[in-house]
């Protein structure tokens, strides 16, 4: 037996006017544009319909006598978007769409802008302001995103046009003018994009659908005002499934109509009322990967879900401000995991966006695969979740110390350094519980052949054994070697006058001209950071200073324990003193110390440079350079 949520029909809608927007969007990070409109002092106390339609209700709806026999249900996950004009705040959000990475795009009608969020509601960026220029809006409404993450916005009212943007809000193109001809609009509202990039627009006051190419070239149109099959009356939104079938919310007729991609009528369902499969003020519509249809049934304060042919599946929501309740839901979207996002237009004091997950009677059965499962470091592995029973959250343990991307469904993980075998585990979770699946010794990483090689710096040129020479710096500079970009290969650089000049990367001002430069990975992110040695202290950019050695020592940096984080040390009178590891006697007091991965085990070994020869502890000596050169060590290939 399953729980049926009763609908609370607590109030009647009040038609709004065309103003009531918030003034003064602060210019700050990731927000472009501003607002120039009337100030809204605060959220109203009663729900208000969007100022889009003026449809006369036919009276009191019949009583809701329907029952839900299907036990599929949805559970509240999170919400975001409080009333206001700050980053991540919303004033009467209307439409919502997702990209292939499940980023969320929302049209914020009161602030006349588009806002972008992560799937958990973290603010990413915003763009738009009131005006007639490119990237500006008159009355913003529908939003859609194509497979390349381009964003399409319906800009209604005086503009009556579609604008196309990149995923970061850069203007790309626009089309449409006010009118009734092909490619013209009288209030475009909903917008959708099919798998081929074709764009569908609900032209609400012309009671039709228009279809365009991705650049705005007119393709076809269909619909006339009426109640017959294929006729439309105030079509508010449109959605396209993976097979190219087009679903339209026909608000004036309180029904859904289904067409093929050229506008041929296929089927319809719905009527005015409060029962299952009945509607009262239809707005947004969405389709999931299985072709199921989700509808924002606004005046019934609920979401309804149907099969592709219109068979009722489930519903949820009632009037109110609590979790899972709605003031006036106007749009709906579904992500790649089946989570449902709902826009609550009159979102005061509730949050404007709510996220729901499919509820399951059974916890997930976790499973996954990775590709590839072996290779040389740095090895990048793409993991694919294949868990059953619809998990809604994922937690990965990759077997190393990194947690990057560990909560993504299908993460990409790089085993950056160090040979070894790694056990990988996935914990998948849904509302019914969690399950963990482990693949023991699943990933095998081998060290690249000749992990580190030798080289010398002479007269402003880096001569690299086994690789091309690199001209960089001046003959009086101190050479430095590091992985500046995290690609697993070493790049050259020089230290001069308190500045690290890094080939292919931004210069870094750090230390004094009299300091000795040092390079290491202080935080384990597999990108080299800079530092200096002065009077027995290692000053490390972005990390705590380390007191070690005496002022006359020569500093050395290495990974003494294989944890992929650099440790400090000093060379004094033929002895390597290593912080956190045993001292090593090697070389002569007047040798130049060198540190490198000589055998590919992920642990640094010591060596010295003397008379044009690299003497490497535990490895063969290498003759390279002149006795007057400055030695360098790095992974060149």
Image (cartoon, rainbow, N blue to C red):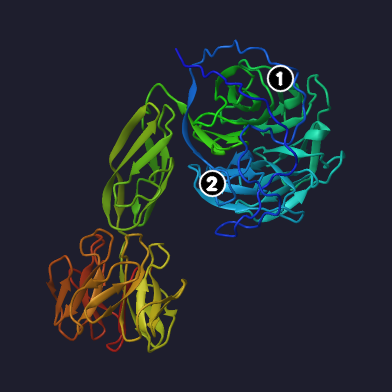
Q: Is residue 581 left or right of residue 633?
A: left
Q: Is residue 591 left or right of residue 91?
A: left
Which percent across, then down, holds residue 389?
42, 26
Quick check: marks 1 and 2 in contact, CB under 8 Å? no
568 up-or-down from 154: above or below: below
Q: Which residue lies under the disc numbered 2?
A: 117
Q: Quadrant of the C terminus?
A: bottom left
Which percent across, then down, holds residue 75?
46, 28
Which percent across, then down, holds residue 133?
75, 56
Q: Which residue lies under the disc numbered 1?
A: 268
Which quadrant of the structure image shows residue 516? bottom left
Q: Quadrant of the N terminus?
A: top left
Is residue 305 at least partly visible in the picture?
A: yes
Q: Is residue 451 left or right of residue 132?
A: left
Q: Residue at x 14, y 80 (%)?
A: 574
Secondary structure under badge 1?
strand
User: Callout 2: 10 Å neighbours few (<14), some, many (20+)?
Assistant: some
User: Callout 1: 10 Å neighbours few (<14), some, many (20+)?
Assistant: some
- Say which of 610 and 351 sits in front: 351
Which percent across, then down, holds residue 89?
56, 47
């Amino acid at each position: 037996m399953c729980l049926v949520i009763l609908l609370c029909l607590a109030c009647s809608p009040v038609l709004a006017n065309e103003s009531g927007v918030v003034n003064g969007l602060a210019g700050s990070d990731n927000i472009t544009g501003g607002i120039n409109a009337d100030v809204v002092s605060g959220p109203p106390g009663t729900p208000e319909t969007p100022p889009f339609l003026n449809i006369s209700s036919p009276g009191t709806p019949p009583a809701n006598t329907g029952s839900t026999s299907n036990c599929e249900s949805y559970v509240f996950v999170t919400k975001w978007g409080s009333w206001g004009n700050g980053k991540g705040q919303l004033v009467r959000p209307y439409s919502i769409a997702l990209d292939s990475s499940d980023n969320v795009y929302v049209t914020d009608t009161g602030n006349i802008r588009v806002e972008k969020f992560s799937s958990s509601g973290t603010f990413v960026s915003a763009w738009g302001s009131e005006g007639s220029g490119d990237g500006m809006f008159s009355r913003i409404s529908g939003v859609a995103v194509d497979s390349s993450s381009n964003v399409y916005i319906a800009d209604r009212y005086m503009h009556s046009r579609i604008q196309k943007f990149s995923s970061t809000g850069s203007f790309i193109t626009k089309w449409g003018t006010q009118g009734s001809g092909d490619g013209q609009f009288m209030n475009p509202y909903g917008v959708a994009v099919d798998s081929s990039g074709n764009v569908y627009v609900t032209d609400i006051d012309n009671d039709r659908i228009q279809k365009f190419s991705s650049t705005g070239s007119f393709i076809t149109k269909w619909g006339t005002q009426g109640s017959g099959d294929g006729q439309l009356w105030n079509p508010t939104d449109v959605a396209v499934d993976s097979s190219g079938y087009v679903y339209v919310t026909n608000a004036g007729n309180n029904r859904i109509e289904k067409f093929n991609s050229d506008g041929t009528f296929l089927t319809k369902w719905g009527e005015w009322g409060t029962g299952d499969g009945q509607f009262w003020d239809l707005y947004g519509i969405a389709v999931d990967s299985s072709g199921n249809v989700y509808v924002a049934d606004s005046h019934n304060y609920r979401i309804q879900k149907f099969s592709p042919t219109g068979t009722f599946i489930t519903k949820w929501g009632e009037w109110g401000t609590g979790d899972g309740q709605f003031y006036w839901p106007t749009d709906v979207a579904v992500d790649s995991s089946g989570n449902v996002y709902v826009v609550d237009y009159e979102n005061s004091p509730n949050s404007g966006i709510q996220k729901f997950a499919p509820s399951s009677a059974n916890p997930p059965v976790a499973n996954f695969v990775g590709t590839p499962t072996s290779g040389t470091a740095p090895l990048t592995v793409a993991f694919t979740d294949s868990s059953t029973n619809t998990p809604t959250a994922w937690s990965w343990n990759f077997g190393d110390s990194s947690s990057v991307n560990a909560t993504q469904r299908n993460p990409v993980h790089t085993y950056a350094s160090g040979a070894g075998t790694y056990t990988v585990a996935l914990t998948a979770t849904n509302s019914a519980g969690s399950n963990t699946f482990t693949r023991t010794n699943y990933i095998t990483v081998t060290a690249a052949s000749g992990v580190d090689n030798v080289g010398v710096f002479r007269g402003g040129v880096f001569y690299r054994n086994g690789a091309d020479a690199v001209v960089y710096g001046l003959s009086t500079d101190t050479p430095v070697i590091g992985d500046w970009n995290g690609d697993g290969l070493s790049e050259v650089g020089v230290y001069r006058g308190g500045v690290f000049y890094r080939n292919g990367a931004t210069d870094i001002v750090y230390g004094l001209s009299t300091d000795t430069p040092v390079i290491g990975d202080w935080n384990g992110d597999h990108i080299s950071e800079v530092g200096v040695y002065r009077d027995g202290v290692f000053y490390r950019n972005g990390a705590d200073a380390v007191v070690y050695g005496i002022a006359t020592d020569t500093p050395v940096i290495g990974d003494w324990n294989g944890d992929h984080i650099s440790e400090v040390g000093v060379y004094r009178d033929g002895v390597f003193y290593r912080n956190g590891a045993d001292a090593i006697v090697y070389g002569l007091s007047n040798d130049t110390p060198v540190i490198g991965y000589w055998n590919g085990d992920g642990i640094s070994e010591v060596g010295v440079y003397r008379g044009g020869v690299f003497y490497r502890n535990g490895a063969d000596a290498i003759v390279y350079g002149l006795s007057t050169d400055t030695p360098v060590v790095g992974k060149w290939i």
